[in-house]
Amino acid sequence: MSWLQGLMMILRVLVVVTCLSAAIASPISGRWRPLAFTALHTSLSPYAVPLRCKASPRAIAWNGGSIHGGLLHLTSLSSAADVGNSFVDALPALLQPSAVFTASNAFVLPFWALMVIAPGAQVTEKLMRSVTPFIVLGLLYLWLAVISSTFPEAVEGLGQGAGQLPVLTKAFSLEPVVATGWVHFLAEDLFVGRWVYLDGRKNDVPIRHSCLLSLLFGPLGVVSHLVTRDIVRRLREAKDGATGEPAVEDVLLKGSR
């Protein structure tokens, strides 16, 4: 079993635990939550095995399964997309991909605002030297990846990597996959912005414009910072090599601290 198959197996186990918890323990309006046990069979394939568990006969009938000898036999869904949809529909509102997407956006904005508006503030430097934001984003990303793994199209598309653009495009047509990719972008962009900020503070280089570009256009922020740093370095070398020259770099640095 390759490392990718092993990772997907771990994610699927997490899906199974969540599905069983929601289906067995959460009645709604006197009825069992209609989270299809059938989804588990499809999402676990080709590693699926009969699951031994206790469940309401009504819940089993609702979801098209049957119990024989204490074993829950699961039937396939008519549409593979129903696997992920059934899982997502059973989640609490705060754990839905759309809610995680919104929360992730709100989470990163204060860090960007501080780097652009108050780069010299002590609180800004303290926050940007911390790794906590990336741990939080990493956990949000992991949760969205678990949700995405319940969609066969996502597993197929992401499993094949960037080798086949049409397959990857199909995978990103799913809302949970888009949310997963977006949190990926948020984390990577913030990491880049953090590097620009810390490097700029270390070398006493203007950083507001580069941090803003990192927020909006990612890699362009890095290019902007490298160019700015080189210009400032050359101006400082020119100043050191001549007497009576105006401190041009002081004009660039004014208001950036």
Image (tube, rainbow, N blue to C red):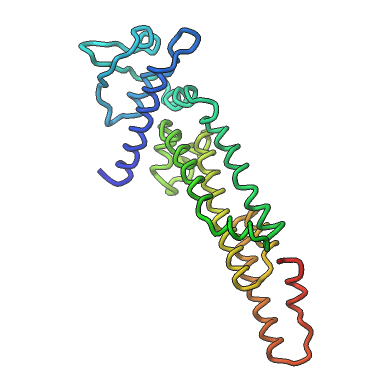
The residue at 66%/71% (across/down) is 205
Image check: 217 left or right of 144?
Answer: right
* Position above or below: 66 against 184: above
Q: Quadrant of residue 227?
A: bottom right
Toward the viewer: 151 or 215?
A: 215
* Position above or below: 63 against 85: above
Residue 221: x, y in percent? 63, 61
Residue 30: x, y in percent? 47, 7
* Position above or below: 99 against 241: above
Image check: 228 left or right of 131?
Answer: right
Which of the image's four quarters has the N terminus?
top left
* Position above or below: 41 against 122: above
Residue 36: x, y in percent? 40, 18
Residue 187: x, y in percent? 53, 50
Which of the image's four quarters has the C terminus?
bottom right
Determine the residue located farthest toward the left in the rendered image.
69
Toward the viewer: 118 or 31?
A: 118
The residue at 42%/42% (across/down) is 158
